[in-house]
Amino acid sequence: MNPINSQKNKSLRFSFLDGVFASGMVGFTQEYFTPFLLILGATAKHIGVLNALPNLVASLIQLKSADLVEKIKSRKKIINIFVFLQALMLLPMAFIALIGAVSPALFIAMVVMFTSFGALANPAWGSLMSDLVKEEKRGEYFGWRNRTLGFIIVAATFIAGIILHNFKKINVFDGFVIIFSFAAIFRIISWYFLKKMHEPSLEYNKGNSFTLLNFLSKIKKSNFAKFVLFVSMMNFSVNISAPFFAVLMLKDLHFSYMLYTVITATATLTIYLTIARWGRQADKIGNLKVIKFVSPLIGIIPLLWIINRHPIFLVFAQIFSGFLWAGFNLCASNFIYDSVTSAKRTRCIAYFSALNGIALCGGSLLGGFLLQKLPNLFGYKILSLFLLSSVLRILVGIFMPMKLKEVRPIEKISNNKLFFSIIGMKPLLGVERKTVRY
């Protein structure tokens, strides 16, 4: 075997092991920051800040990620430094849970630092991984990787939910001490495997550097800049309501931690059950085709929660949600890899992530503000917020992708055929219209 290919394959194995333990950390944290804040006595404004401020700070600090890589001349070193710091930040979170009654603001500050350290590592990690995986196999590989690791996230989420469910009868704070401590251990182990990865050589040329203002100035001409604007606007629309699904379930509907975990994990499980299928299709028909197909449908998700809030119905709503987000998230990431050269990839990923983080922050803050102003809908102000988010998602999902172009040769396929190929069925006679082409 070619020595270079051997190094790449070994690095991908270490990357997978890193992903296994990083996924354990994600499962023990991402769905439980909001519930922990709620038991600290947080208000809706606190929840909005929790989902806004980490994204804002991480976005702004992430703008320096590419500069740090170019200064140190190593993506791997940047990844290792900030992943280790992210692991350390979980320890004070566990301590906060141990002492119990603390200010919600203190915990939010911990989450801001935790998120920021992870954000600084992400562009370098994305750039490194895109060099390790063959271009024509990215959809298949990342689909397989995300699906496999996603099952671990779901399992960890359920385990964390069971821990909290059982400790609620004793002292729920002790349950959070356990899950945050395990999350720290998992991240340390993932850091160990990241250190063993090989970094392909990359030429660091000042000619490949450009500022955020340079990037934004090309928004009318650059296909990639338009794509970043589209995804940012979609995330803004989504995050107007996204932080408040947990509030609706835990505070308004009084769901148990176990029921909350089941409903939340259903979407995550669906994402990873379908993501590999989306990846294989995207390799053939292009990432943009998938994005254009799923984007308007994402606007329907909040409407389902308005229609019915019975737990069984919400499980099916989450299956629908996970199916769509699997295609959107995977293809949005892979579209970046296809659109920019290796030398510029770290900076482009940083700018993409930064602008999306600012959009997420803006959406959360607006949602938290509007939640106090909007009228009740079927007895809940949150449902009015869901309706607003739904309308914005649909408008962004329909109109903004029209200005985008695919960046590589693809097969043409109708929307009907794409849908049935993803769910693993052939269309019935008369359902597929062969005149519909992308």
Image (cartoon, rainbow, N blue to C red):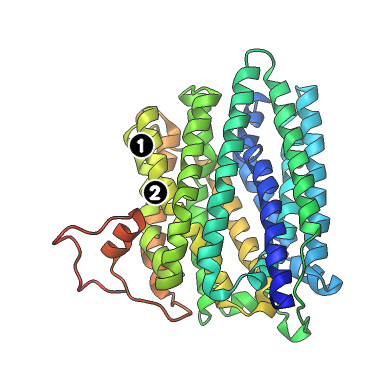
Q: Quadrant of the N terminus?
A: bottom right
Is residue 99 visible in the rendered structure shown here? yes
Camera-side residue of 278 and 53: 278
Q: Residue at x 58, y 72 (%)?
A: 337
Furthest residue to the bottom?
A: 207
View extreme (front): residue: 1
Question: Which residue appears at 28% of the width and 64% of the height?
Answer: 417
The image shows residue 62 at horizontal and vertical percentages of 72, 61
Q: Are marks 1 and 2 in contact (CB under 8 Å)?
A: yes
Q: Which mark is residue 390?
A: 2
Q: Quadrant of the C terminus?
A: bottom left
Q: How many residues crowd mark 2 within 10 Å: few (<14), some (14–19), many (20+)?
A: many
Q: Position of residue 76 (x, y in %)?
A: 79, 65
Can you name the residue that lies furthest to the top here?
170
Nearest to the observer: residue 75 or residue 364: 75
- Labelled disc at residue 306: 1
Say above or below: 24 vs 378. Answer: below
Query: Where residue 183 sits: x, y (%)?
Result: 72, 38
356 or 79, which lies in front?
Answer: 79
Residue type at mark 2 is Ser
Residue at (42, 46) in percent of width and height: 321
Q: Is residue 22 above or below residue 210?
A: above
- Label whose residue precedes the other's in the sequence (1 or 2): 1
Check disc 2 and report its element: helix, strand or loop.
Answer: helix
Element under disc 1:
helix
Q: For residue 105, what is the image quadrant?
A: top right
The amino acid type, in three-letter code, at marker 1 is Ile
